[in-house]
Image (cartoon, coloured by chain):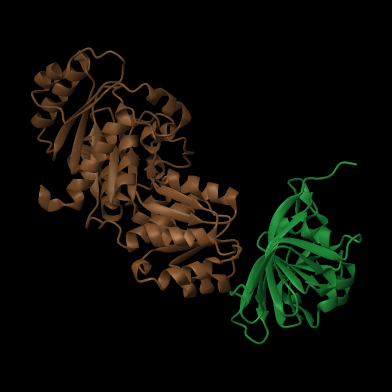
Amino acid sequence: MTMGARNLINLDLFTDAYRVTGRALVGTGGIHAELGNPNSKFLELQDAYISRIHEPGAIIANYKLASFRKDNINFIVLSDRRDGIPVGTQHGRSVFTRGRHIPVFLTVPSFEIQGVVIHEGKASAREILVQSMGRFQLVFEAKASASSAPDISYSGDLILVQKDRVGIFCLDLSQTGT
Amino acid sequence: MARIYVIDDDEQLLRMVGLMLERGGHTVTLISNPVDGLEQVRTDKPDLLVLDVMMPNMSGHDISREVRSNKNLEDLPILVLTARSQEVDRATALKSGADDYLSKPVTSQELIERVDGLLAKRGGPKKAEEGVLVTLFGLRGGSGRTTLAVNLAAAIRRVSQQEVCLVDLSPTGSQTVMHMRLQARSSWVDLPPDKLDWNTLKNHLIIHPSGLRVLAAPSKPVSAVAPPEETTRTILSLLRQNVAFTVVDAPNVYSAAFVAAVSEADMSLHVVTPEVVSVQTAVQLNRLLAKTNVTIKRKSHILNQVTPEAQLPQSAVERGLNTRVAFLIGYDANQARAMAQGVPLTLTSAKSPLPTVVKRMAEAIWQRVATPTAE
């Protein structure tokens, strides 16, 4: 079996109380594939720098290596969607980037997230969460704002949101596009 | 040229940032250990500090705070360069004492622009009130005029740390882009003849990694009378208003653009080679300019030896021109290689004749501008 190319990507990862900035080693499937890998319940980060959610600029600790239970990750912010998923080639879009563009608003503990989901098929919250691949929902061109301090926000070309952590999920069907 | 210290624990990135800054004309010290870095900054007091945020033992924010609490270093410009790219990180960096913030990955152009902006803001050399225009001219082909223009512009940029623009007015195809290995996506032929303003012109300037801006000539030959006189004067006037130094490589035909380039200039450098035909052409041109009442300010002659053997000694050239040559540039065997590599010699560490003399020329020009009372 041939191993695909692997490279380190930068990401911001959020648990209930912490923000961790670090680097993850991913293959051609991006971080989405790593998160969906059934052989490991953990995600490893290199050069992890930890901040508290309410003071996200201040680094309280750093470690060469850190592991996270995938269940405990609320969301991950990426500055480039290509670090998250295969986006397709010049011949066509990948399965992740095909379909209607639907503006969404959703919440996870301590954060509200706004952005766009790309979905083929019936546009309902349940359909999207059930039909989309993996345990993390892809929200493109997204912004996560702290619920208690909305001026603290994190923007990314792609935010991967743990589906099990989603509280509210709203769709804006008046503004869908392709 | 500024002394810049870069502190980053990622040695690969450290080297990359170092190379970018060196290409921008700065002297760079690379430090991978933040604790040692702070100590060295305290001892040496560099002109600017580039800092990573996420480093073991001591974060970039900690270093910024330490620097700002030190009376000797409180005016040291700090640029934070980090993979933490959120707005909250920018705010934290500025609150800790940094002057500016860039998120990784960074392009060479972005980095140089920010660094130069900070240097100019904090104790950098005073910018001239109005830009200075230097024109290199000569009607004899093959005199190395474009080579000199490219190298002089790059050297002025290094010496002055100001905005410098190189204008290639050649109607016979752009040579400057080859000298600097640039992608000429536009040239003066693409400028709108009527509504030409600074914003439009700025968008047509190509930026070299050294920070030098270039207005390229069209890649294919155009009419010998191009660009029109009015357009040329507008271009030069806009550059004078917005850029500290403009170096013009005048066309090697006696056109309206040629006359505009030499008459608008604050300093004109007539490039001559030590051979009979070149001197004769220069003499004829000087006569023609005098006859047509073209006023040239601060004209100097540059004797540029482009072949290993000089046909005429300097004294014979000076007798022919009836004036002294201001600078003599000896034959430089490195130039052919520099041209092939697309890197101007003045941006390398070469100590050969061309970069040595051109750097002296640049220093002399900068000296005149920086200390106008010395004239």
Report if residue A166 is visible in the image.
yes
Q: Is residue A51 left or right of residue B78?
A: right
Which residue is located at x 81 percent, y 72 percent?
A162
Q: Quadrant of residue A126?
A: bottom right
Q: Position of residue B23 (x, y in %)?
A: 44, 43
Closer to us: B110 or B281 = B110
Is residue A172 shown above or below B192? below
Q: Quadrant of residue B206?
A: top left
Report if residue B226 is visible in the image.
no
Closer to us: B57 or B215 = B57
Which residue is located at x 79 percent, y 72 percent?
A73
Closer to us: B106 or B52 = B52
Q: Position of residue B87 (x, y in %)?
A: 56, 71
For chain B, the rendered hue is brown
Q: Is residue B231 left or right of residue A99?
A: left
Q: Is residue A53 left or right of residue B137?
A: right
For chain A, the rendered hue is green
Q: How many marks?
A: 0
Q: Position of residue B12 (x, y in %)?
A: 59, 48
Is residue A57 shown above or below B256? below
Is residue B96 shown above or below B141? below
